[in-house]
Image: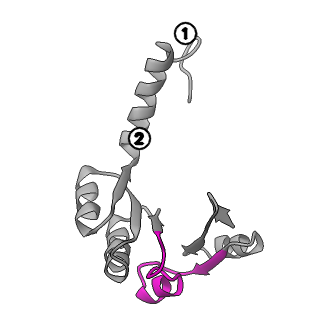
Amino acid sequence: MQLDRRPMFVIDESVQAVELLKVAGVEALSGNAAREALLAAANVRQARLLVVAIPNSFEAGQIVQQARRANPAIEIITRAHYDAEVDYLSKLGANSVIMGEREIARAMIEQVRADGTTGDQTGPQAL
């Protein structure tokens, strides 16, 4: 499987998710990506982009640190829940850290700016 015409390799702890990915033609391995051997198997040394989508910032930090050490040129995008995690992951070498709460707030502000309302004004609206 390709994302924007880029080859993709997935590491996921869920055996079922990995099997579904393989059926869909995506290269995948099951396990904890913080294990250096799995990152090596994913060829992180030659990768251009790494997306770390796990919620545990400590494990994400281990992955970021190992990937940066193996490939100083790799672009690393990860996620965080708190400002302290953003700082932590950035200091370990993440190029971009997406904080979910900020993105939710940004989307809410953009919605209000786009139409000046939150919907049909008859009650709450879920976006």
Measured from the top left, where is residue 75 in percent x and y? 40, 65
With respect to residue 88, does 18 lie above or below? below
Q: Residue at x 25, y 50 (%)?
A: 83
Could you say which quadrant of the image residue 21 lies in? bottom right
- Examine the rendering and report whether any part of residue 105 can be seen: yes
Identity, as a three-letter code, of the amino acid under mark 1: Gln
Quadrant containing the N terminus is: bottom right
Instruction: Estimate how packed mark 1 is, as few (under 14), some (14 to 19) or many (20 or more) residues with alpha carbons within 10 Å.
Output: few
Q: Residue at x 47, y 67 (%)?
A: 49
With respect to residue 98, does 2 lie above or below? below
- Examine the rendering and report whether any part of residue 80 can be seen: no
Side of 53 relative to 9 (left or right): left
Side of 62 relative to 124 (left or right): left
Measured from the top left, where is residue 34 in percent x and y? 41, 79
Tell me the magenta residue range. 27-48
**For mark 2, what is the residue?**
103
**For mark 1, what is the residue?**
121
Measured from the top left, where is residue 28 in percent x and y? 62, 77
Which of the pair 21/46 is nearer the observer? 46
Identity, as a three-letter code, of the amino acid under mark 2: Glu
Which of the pair 15/114 is nearer the observer? 114
**SS of the residue at dot 1?**
loop
46 in magenta: yes
Q: From the viewer's perspective, is the residue at label 2 or at label 1 nearer?
A: 2
Residue lying farthest to the right in this orientation: 23
Disc 2 to disc 1, C-alpha distance: 24 Å
Q: Residue at x 27, y 61 (%)?
A: 90
Side of 66 relative to 115 (left or right): left
